Amino acid sequence: MKLSASIACVAYLASSFAAARADTLRIVAAENFYGGVAQQIAGGSATVKSILTNPNQDPHEFTTNADTAKSVADADVVIYSGISYDPWMDKLLGTSGKPCRAVINVADLIGGKDGDNPHIWYDPKTMPALGARLVEVLSKLSPDQAATYQKRLDDFNASMKPELDKIAEIRAASAGLDVTATEPVFGYMARALGFKMLNYDFQIQIMNDAEPTADETAAFEESLKSKTAKILFYNSQVTDPTTDRIQKIARDSGIPVVGVTETQPPDQNTYVGWMMHELDGVQAALKSNPATSP
């Protein structure tokens, strides 16, 4: 860091406590599920703006505008997913912003790297890691509230217990179950549940708006027609003729179909509530078909 930037940063930190008394901190999250957790940790000490909030919008096709750029420039804390899920944020962060603006790349917190499945918020360890990092960042900006932030993190982690218990329950009953998906959205949660995910190459092609090869498509369809795959997951926010056809094959073959979403739906008030809703869908699928016993 250049000397002038260091001086500006020190001056900003020195004045941040007084500023926090006069005004709330500004947190900008690229995705609404991170924004929701940030609000739970920060409480009334911060205003949180989430950029991706529309459940009918394909996150992979998002483009920024002047309002988005200004929000990022004015933020005290910026949270984004990383590993190429939201590359537009890297561009916005390359422009000038507040001195000592804290930037949290969530993938870095859990050891994510380029080429990994980017849907890391379905990994049960992701949000506790984000919460812990937020406590560190916010406690530096508002030292008098450090204990309050830690208490909120403790409460958040406690709120995840029903989710973790349900994951353990499903895993105990169905570990080793063969499943498949039109996209890798649910991949980390499927792994946490002990499921074996089939047709990953097909899923990556669909995620990247590419056409699966004939062999990939044939293998996917055969996994459904032969009933090797016991559940089909699909991204309910992004459908096209290919994924519609896949769903029809699954239903015609008696394979339960479970829709999952990339962003937190407006009818789910919390991240944990959203995950519990998704897990309820998994349990319903398992109960609907005796063939789901591994």
Image: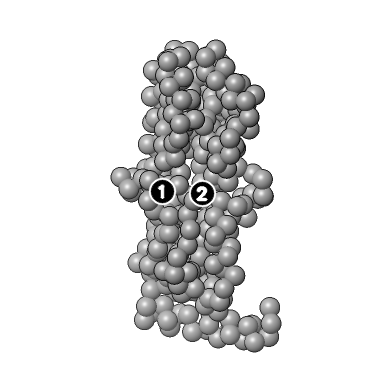
- The residue located at (41%, 69%) in the rendering is 67
Residue 266 visible at all: yes
Q: Residues within 10 Å of mark 1 (few under 14, many from 20)?
A: some
Q: Nearer the viewer, residue 184 or 23?
A: 184
Q: In the drawing, does residue 286 fall left or right of residue 94?
A: left
Measured as percent of width and height from the top left, residue 7 is found at 62, 86
Residue drawn at (44%, 69%) of the image: 66
Q: Nearer the viewer, residue 124 or 185?
A: 185
Tell me: 175 left or right of 255: right
Q: How many marks?
A: 2
According to the picture, the residue beneath numbered tag 1 turns out to be 57
What number is the disc on residue 40? Answer: none
Question: Observer-nearest residue: 53 or 161?
Answer: 53
Q: Say above or below: 50 vs 119.
A: below
Q: Identify the secondary structure beneath mark 2.
A: helix
Please say whether residue 154 is visible from this viewpoint: no
Color scheme of the displayed model: one colour
**Secondary structure at numbered mark 1:** loop
On screen, residue 36 above or below 162: below
Q: Residue at x 48, y 17 (%)?
A: 292
The mark found on residue 60 in the picture is 2
Q: Residue furthest left?
A: 267
- Where residue 12 sits in the image (x, y, percent)? 53, 82
Give the CA distance from mark 2 to mark 1.
9 Å
Which residue is most to the right? 2
Of the residues shown, which amino acid type is indicated by label 2?
Answer: His
Residue 271 percent across, percent down from the top left? 41, 47
Q: Quadrant of the C terminus?
A: top right
Q: Could you tell me residue 238's position as x and y percent?
A: 44, 40
Which residue type does callout 1 highlight? Gln
